[in-house]
Image (tube, rainbow, N blue to C red):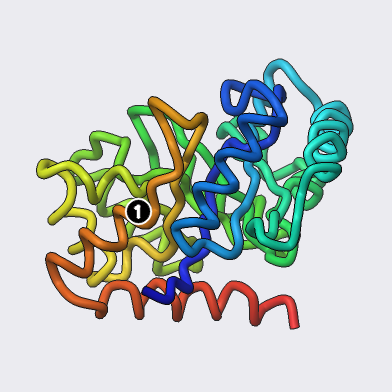
C-alpha cells in the first residue's frame, strides 16, 4: 500500500522530553515508520512555556537532533522539526512562536488544556498565529472530552483558519474510531499524527490507523487528509 500520509506529531528526538530515551530507540521508531511506508514525520517535543524559554528549547532540540542526525540514512523518514506547544496566556504577544513552527510549514502545534476551553482561549491561539503568518494546529483532538459548546468553538476555530490533528490511536479504539472519521468527513480534522513516544507502549502506529480507516470507509477520508497536507506545504511556495 502506497502511503502518502505525513506523521505531524511525534516525540522521536532522544532525551528531550517524555518520548524517546535514546538515539537507539529513536532509530527503531524511525525504522518502524519506514517499514509502515511513512516518508515524512514531524518531531514535535513538548514545549512548556511556564518552565522553559523558546531559546533554551531550541538549543536543546538542536542538540537532540544533531545526535540523531549522525545515525540517519536515506531509508528513514524525512524529519521536520517543530514543537508541541502547551497553551499559555499571552500567546498573542509571543513573537518567538514563529521559531517553533514545524519546518517547511507554517504550522504551530498547540496542546490545549484538558478541559474548560473558552472562546477567548481559541481566539488567543488564532490571533497569535495569524499575527505571525502562521496556522495554528490543535494537537490530538481525540484526547479531549469536549462538550457540545466546546465542539462549537472548535468548528468556529476551523472556520476562521485553524486546523486540527487527530492521533492514530483514535482510529484503533471502538469508542473513538467512528467519531474521529466523521470529524474528518465534516472538515474538523485535517491532519494525522502517531504521537509516538517509544517502541512499546506508545509506538508509531499510523499504518494501523490508515488500514482501519480504509477498512471502515474506504479511501475517501485519506484523500481529505492528503488534500489538507498539500494545502499546508503549498503555503510555503
Quarter location, residue 52? top right
Q: Which residue is mark 1?
A: 154
Find numbered disc 1 in the image and state the secondary structure of the residue it sits on: helix
Residue 56 in the image: x percent, y percent?
A: 86, 26
Residue at 67% across / 78% down in the picture? 235
In this image, 72 relative to 134: left or right?
right
Q: Please give left or right for residue 75 compared with residue 31 in the image.
A: right
Question: Could you tell me which residue is drawn at 67 percent across and 30 percent down?
Answer: 24
**73 or 232: nearer the viewer:** 73
232 is higher (above) or lower (below) than 119: below
Q: Which residue is depicted at the point 38% across and 47% down?
A: 205
Against 81, residue 75 (above or below) is: below
Residue toward you, 213 or 99: 213
**Quick check: 196 left or right of 221?**
right
Image quadrant assignment for residue 102: bottom right
Q: Quarter of the image containing the N terminus?
A: bottom left
Measured from the top left, where is residue 181 in percent x and y? 21, 61
The answer to whether one can see residue 130 in this image is no
Amino acid at each position: 500500500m502506497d502511503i502518502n500520509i505525513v506523521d505531524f506529531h511525534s516525540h522521536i528526538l532522544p532525551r528531550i522530553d517524555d518520548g524517546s530515551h535514546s538515539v537507539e530507540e529513536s532509530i527503531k521508531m524511525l525504522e518502524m515508520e519506514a517499514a509502515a511506508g511513512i516518508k515524512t514525520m514531524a518531531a514535535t517535543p513538548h514545549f512548556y512555556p511556564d518552565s522553559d524559554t523558546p531559546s533554551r528549547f531550541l538549543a536543546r532540540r538542536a542538540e537532540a537532533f544533531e545526535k540523531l542526525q549522525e545515525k540517519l540514512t536515506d531509508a528513514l523518514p524525512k524529519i521536520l522539526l517543530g514543537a508541541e506547544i502547551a497553551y499559555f496566556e499571552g500567546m498573542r504577544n509571543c513573537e518567538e512562536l514563529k521559531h517553533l513552527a514545524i519546518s517547511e510549514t507554517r504550522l504551530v502545534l498547540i496542546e490545549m488544556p484538558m478541559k474548560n476551553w473558552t472562546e477567548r482561549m481559541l481566539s488567543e491561539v488564532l490571533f497569535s498565529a495569524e499575527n505571525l503568518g502562521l496556522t495554528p494546529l490543535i494537537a490530538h483532538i481525540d484526547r479531549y472530552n469536549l462538550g457540545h459548546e466546546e465542539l462549537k468553538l472548535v468548528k468556529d476555530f476551523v472556520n476562521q483558519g485553524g486546523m486540527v490533528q487527530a492521533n492514530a490511536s483514535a482510529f484503533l479504539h471502538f469508542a473513538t474510531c467512528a467519531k474521529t472519521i466523521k470529524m474528518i468527513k465534516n472538515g474538523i480534522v485535517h491532519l494525522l499524527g502517531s504521537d509516538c513516544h517509544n517502541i512499546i507502549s506508545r509506538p508509531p502506529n499510523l499504518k494501523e490507523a490508515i488500514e482501519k480507516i480504509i477498512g471502515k470507509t474506504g479511501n475517501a477520508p485519506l484523500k481529505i487528509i492528503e488534500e489538507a497536507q498539500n494545502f499546508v506545504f503549498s503555503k510555503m511556495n
